[in-house]
Amino acid sequence: MPNRAVICLGANVPDASERLEAASEFLGAVGVVNKATPKYLTAPEYAGDVAPYLNRVVELHTTVTYETALRMTKDYQTRVRELAQAQPFVAVDIDIVIWNGAVVRQGDAAAAYFRQGLAMLE
């Protein structure tokens, strides 16, 4: 039986829509995207006075372990950020928030940007 991950994607660069599309496609290398919300704008939380974020929440089914999925998503995030050199913007943020029904990132799970997407996903 595959693992179920609920993942929050975000970016606040000028080409954020394209960045989220690319990140969504990348997740296909980690597993199967079962559901995804439309992209939606949110005010920055925890980031100070920066541009609004474009977000998307994705449900992913995967046979890899949590540790492998976390490493793969964070490696991708790091590569994109290094190539973009978009300071003070965030080229892409990928966070596994729920893994097999358990919240693994409490702060993200409580944040409005994630709750809004989770409500659209369910």
Image (spheres, rainbow, N blue to C red):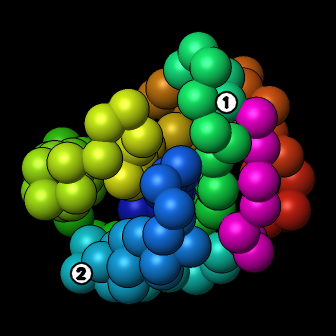
Chain-order first, disc 2 or disc 1: 2
- Is residue 6 a member of the stretch shown in magenta? no
Q: Please give the range of residues in magenta.
A: 37-43
Q: Secondary structure at mark 2?
A: helix
Tell me the residue that label 1 is attached to. 44
Observer-nearest residue: 88 or 120? 88
**Number of numbered tags placed on the structure image:** 2
Q: Residue 2: x percent and y percent?
A: 39, 71
Tell me the residue that label 2 is attached to. 29
Q: Residues within 10 Å of mark 2 (few under 14, many from 20)?
A: few
Report the residue at 62% width, 39% height from top.
51
Observer-nearest residue: 75 or 1? 75
Q: Residue 118: x percent and y percent?
A: 77, 51
Position of residue 99 relative to residue 73, above or below, is: above
Position of residue 29 relative to residue 59, above or below, is: below
- Is residue 41 a member of the stretch shown in magenta? yes
Where the N terminus falls, by quadrant?
A: bottom left
Where the C terminus falls, by quadrant?
A: bottom right
Q: Secondary structure at mark 1?
A: loop
What is the quadrant of residue 80 in the picture?
bottom left
Amino acid type, residue under disc 1 in the picture: Pro
Can you tell which mark lies on residue 53? none
Structural distance between the alpha carbons of marks 2 and 1: 29 Å
Amino acid type, residue under disc 2 in the picture: Ala
Report the residue at 48% width, 69% height from top.
15
Q: Residue 76: x percent and y percent?
A: 18, 59
